[in-house]
């Protein structure tokens, strides 16, 4: 499994002579941020969330310290504690998304749903409108999806992802990045991605420039144990990404077919970027890219963002134990059922959180992806690539990347300098091309896939 997974876990930035990536400085901040993420803090957050008994979206707020309302209040206070840790004028903006959900199958009477949101505004005027999300749902359910009173600790699903949000917020709140970072804890996920659907639709309506969503759902229990390296799942996390975008228009589908770009959606480029960051930073937990939107019969909050046209991926542990998911807390014939805190491996969760945090730092501090990237097809000649330059003032240059049409990762890279056009002696018919920007500090953007145009 390790050897096979490794094929998917790192982008190979090498190639023939003259095709090496730019000799850029290595940014120091990602490693510093990863070092500050603490497994014991994550453990405490998971234990606290499990202590609310149930976090079912329809649970009562009448019992002190129990139910989703108590969990929500604690989440808001914990985010605000990050705000209070910032010297001087706080930048962190913590607020609640509150909306009335009309009746749906798992909420037959409708009701109020509340997301908890923390926003760290970007520091660069030319980059601050770009938004990069880490998301997780904080609600839980037992075996009966409509049972809003039984214990549903939801340790792995999804106190683990929610704990990751809080820890990333703690570490980044005092060191804002060039672009805006959003930490989104949603409710109503188990009722049909309701909180995420509302938030994503609202972001679309308001014209938010959402560039990437890293959704963390079931990221605390690697099954089998992480520290003991007892099986093939230890040390890896799956990263799911859609290929063909959701709800594509007819012309968009025709263009995908013309270019054979079924595996080059914006979400897929973010998944590749996660793998590249893992290689650059040598993270302990490595991503295994899975080229499908999600697991069979299930879905997560990233799909709500995909539906609105935003790039989004899902992080999920490799091995899932179904006796621990959506199960009442009980013991039958010596088998313990229920999503209990004892099954969460804090060190594994810390590894996944560090991978998220490193990816976030690279994304938010890098220039945006170059726009209007295209192969010039006016003549039968080798590859001429053109693009629009990025507006960030610290952009220093661009790399053209390419790969064989059967490769899942970008295989070759050539630094072409601070230009908007490059010609490579590589047949445009035999490979896929893309372009990424880099800045003076060594941060690289995700790749923009090259379309085709006559000029």
Image (cartoon, rainbow, N blue to C red):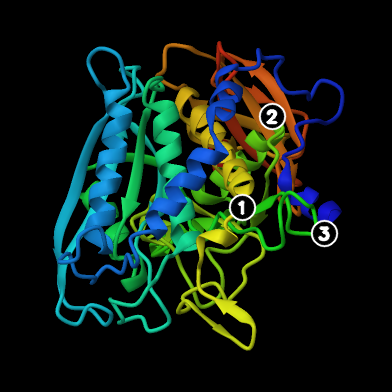
- Against 205, residue 277 (above or below) is above
The spot of residue 349 in percent (x, y) is 58, 47
Q: Which one is nearer the viewer's eye here, 23 or 423?
A: 23
Q: Is mark 3 on a helix, strand or loop?
A: loop
Q: Are marks 2 and 3 in contact (CB under 8 Å)?
A: no
- Against 333, residue 414 (above or below) is above
Task: Examine the image and state in which quarter residue 27 appears.
Answer: top right
Q: How far apart are marks 2 and 3 (CA)?
A: 22 Å
Q: What element carries label 2?
A: helix
Q: What element carries label 1?
A: loop
Give the residue at mark 1: 345
* Quadrant of the image containing the N terminus: bottom right
Of the numbered discs 1 and 2, the one sitting upstream in the chain is 2
The spot of residue 256 in percent (x, y) is 53, 57
Q: Which one is nearer the viewer's eye here, 267 or 38?
A: 38
Task: Examine the image and state in which quarter residue 302 appears.
Answer: bottom left
Task: Examine the image and state in which quarter residue 125 appears.
Answer: top left
Residue found at the very far bottom of the displayed protein? 333
Q: Identify which residue is drawn at 59% across, 61% down.
A: 343
Give the residue at mark 2: 280
Q: Distance between the residues labelled 1 and 2?
A: 25 Å
Q: Would you say residue 216 is visible in this rendering?
A: no
Give the residue at mark 3: 1
């Amino acid at each position: 499994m390790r050897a096979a997974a490794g094929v998917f876990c790192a982008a190979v930035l090498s190639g023939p002579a003259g095709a090496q990536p730019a000799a850029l400085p290595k940014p120091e901040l990602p490693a510093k941020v990863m070092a500050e993420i603490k497994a014991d803090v994550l453990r405490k957050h998971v234990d606290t969330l499990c202590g609310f008994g149930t976090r079912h979206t329809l649970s009562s707020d009448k019992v002190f310290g129990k139910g989703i309302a108590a969990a929500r209040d604690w989440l808001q206070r914990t985010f605000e504690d990050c705000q209070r840790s910032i010297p001087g004028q706080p930048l962190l903006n913590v607020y609640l998304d509150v909306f009335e959900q009309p009746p749906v199958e798992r909420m037959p009477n409708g009701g109020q749903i509340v997301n908890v949101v923390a926003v760290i505004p970007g520091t660069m005027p030319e980059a601050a409108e770009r938004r990069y999300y880490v998301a997780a749902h904080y609600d839980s359910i037992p075996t009966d999806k409509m049972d809003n009173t039984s214990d549903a600790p939801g340790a792995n699903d999804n106190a683990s992802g929610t704990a990751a949000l809080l820890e990333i917020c703690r570490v980044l709140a005092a060191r804002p990045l060039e672009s805006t970072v959003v930490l989104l804890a949603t409710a109503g996920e188990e009722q049909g991605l309701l909180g995420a659907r509302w938030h994503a639709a609202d972001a679309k309506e308001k014209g938010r420039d959402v560039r990437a969503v890293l959704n963390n759902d079931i990221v605390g229990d690697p099954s089998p144990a992480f520290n003991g390296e007892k099986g093939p799942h230890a040390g890896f996390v799956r990263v799911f990404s859609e290929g063909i975008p959701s709800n594509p228009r007819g012309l968009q589908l025709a263009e995908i077919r013309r270019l054979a770009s079924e595996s080059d959606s914006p979400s897929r480029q973010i998944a590749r970027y996660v793998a590249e960051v893992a290689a650059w930073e040598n993270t302990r937990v490595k991503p295994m890219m899975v080229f499908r939107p999600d697991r069979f019969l299930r879905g997560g909050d990233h799909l709500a963002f995909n539906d609105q046209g935003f790039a989004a991926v899902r992080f999920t542990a490799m091995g899932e134990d179904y006796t621990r998911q959506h199960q009442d807390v009980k013991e039958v014939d010596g088998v313990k059922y229920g999503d209990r805190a004892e099954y969460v491996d804090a060190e594994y969760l810390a590894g996944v959180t560090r991978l998220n945090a490193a990816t976030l730092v690279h994304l938010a501090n890098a220039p945006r992806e170059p726009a209007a990237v295209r192969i010039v097809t006016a003549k039968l000649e080798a590859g001429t690539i053109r693009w629009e330059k990025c507006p960030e003032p610290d952009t220093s240059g661009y790399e053209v990347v390419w790969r064989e049409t059967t490769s899942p990762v970008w295989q070759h890279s050539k630094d072409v300098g601070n230009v908007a056009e490059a010609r490579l002696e590589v047949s445009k018919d035999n490979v896929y091309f893309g372009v990424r920007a880099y800045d003076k500090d060594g941060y690289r953007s995700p790749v923009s896939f090259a379309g085709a145009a006559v000029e």
